[in-house]
Amino acid sequence: MTRRVRRRLCRENAKGKDAVEDEDEEKAMSGSDPSPWGLVVAAAAWCGECVDWTMLPDDTVLQLFARLNYRDRASMAAACKTWRALGSSPCLWSSLDLRAHRCDPEVASSLSSRCGSLRRLRLRGHEAAAAASGLRARDLREVVADGCRGLTDATLAVLAARHEALESLQIGPDPLERISSDALRQVALCCSRLRRLRLSGLRDADADAIGALARYCPLLEDVAFLDCGSVDESALAGIISIRFLSVAGCRNLKWATASTSWAQLPSLIAVDVSRTDVSPSAISRLISHSKTLKLICALNCKSVEEEQAHNPDAFSNSKGKLVLTITSHIFKSAVSLFPGKVVKENEVFNECNWRDKDKALGDMMSWLEWILSQSLLRIAESNPQGMDDFWLHQGTEMLLSLVKSSQEDVQERAATTLATFVVIDDESANVDAARSEAVMRVGGIPMLLDLARCSRESAQSEAAKAIANLSVNAKVAKAVADEQGITILTNLAKSMNRLVAEEAAGGLWNLSVGEEHKGAIAAAGGIKALVDLIFRWPAGSDGVLVRSFDTPHFSEISILLAIFFWEIISLSLL
């Protein structure tokens, strides 16, 4: 394990109390170590009793296992036979996130004995998707994958064939350029229990493939074809079970046909047409003809925005149907989704308002969170002109609301968007001062630091990235330092997850630009953490993780960090 508790009995004073030898206990007592082990050590030290770890109740050990990442969990399970058995408990392996680890056939085979009860799998890369069948998780219900640009028809077909119990399949946001309608048909044929299908960047989704989904997947209620080359809009009307539909980013749709045919869907509740060339007349047709539709999301749709600018009341008489656009006040508009209930505008995405009360409303709000997180990230990446007013007056607050979502992928995507929308020039690392200070002004810094301290490594890396980018602004950097952000980033720089460590190092680098923070970084142990980082993954080594996108060579990072060390050491010697 990465932390060990070493104790000895103080026989000299005959008091029979423990003396703590490990520095981790001091951290735990001071509150600087929020890890499960730190909390246990603190509790033991407070009680002044000797702890026999082998006598801990099974449920306590399972709670500790559940709070550890997979690497530490495996180390903990190797301690003894009892813990090895507990470490294989089905309750610990119902969900598996392999995005931070290389997943190849050998790794999948080594995990297969524990995956008999696996229900949810998250992975990154087409190689991991190809190896997933080696987990032998026959009863797998949900697969969420990203970084799968190289995924082929054959791999997707095998993934579907080996997991016939799949209820949810999400692959994106990287475009699936090598996936055709043939693979879509195979998914339909193999996965008859499918309820949710979300795919990005398909070459095409023709009438035959969509027809197969309609025939063989009678439970399918959530369909998203994002940024696809072509989608047969009339064939989608054949999926009569569909409740939520997104075609965001699809540019080749015939909107007259789409709006007429989709209006006939008997269960359709919400439609997302963001980032498309949808016409105002198509929106009006959906509003007028659909009997079940409640929500239309049309973010960054130029024609619709121009119509609203010319006629602000264009969609106001919408027969109870809500139309969300960039130019509308989304928070204020979303309040209307809670009839007969008093909800504050900034609390519309608070799960407490719909959890265990109204399943239909809960489903729609969960879908809306996912849709907004997708669209806002895409908009931030393209950075179109004229978005400052939106970002400053509601976009920032909306992203911070999504950071608190109960959906992990929504949380992480919102943090990624916060890291993206403040950068206006990647080459010069130029950060928009107004946007970064807007995040600080509405309480975003403590929120991101809280996310960085969670147990999920994927969330840690995205939060650290956002903090790093925001810290380019001197005012935000001071706020980060005041909120103990230097200590948090230093702890993250010690992570065995390469992506987390890199993002944390970037955050410390940006904070070091201000002279007043260099001494604090040195005092927090940042120098040792960053030196260890260089030696942990030297130039040319694969390390334990591989990013799914291009990063600087580690030799270049080493040079930058060496300069950084010299500046801090020089300061500390003054």
Image: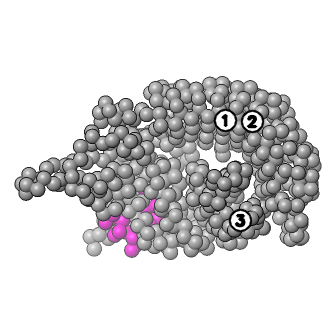
SS assignment at label 1: loop
**Residue under circle 2?**
219
Q: Say left or right for 488 vs 7.
A: right
| Number of numbered labels in the structure image | 3
Front position in the image: 542 or 444? 444
Position of residue 381 measured from the top left corner of the image (x, y, whole percent):
66, 56
Question: CB of mark 2 within 8 Å of CB of mark 1?
Answer: yes
Position of residue 275 measured from the top left corner of the image (x, y, whole percent):
77, 55
Single out the mark in the foreground, 3 or 1: 3
**Residue under circle 3?**
341
Mark 3 to mark 1: distance in Å? 32 Å
Name the amino acid type tagged 3: Lys
Name the amino acid type tagged 1: Glu
Q: Is residue 531 above or below residue 178?
A: below
Residue positioned 44% across, 57% down in the render: 453
Decide which of tag 2 and tag 1 comes sooner along the chain.
Answer: 1
- Callout 3: few (<14), some (14-19), or many (20+) C-alpha neighbours within 10 Å? few
Name the amino acid type tagged 2: Leu
SS assignment at label 3: loop
**Residue under circle 1?**
167
Residue positioned 33% across, 41% down in the render: 57
Front position in the image: 220 or 21? 220
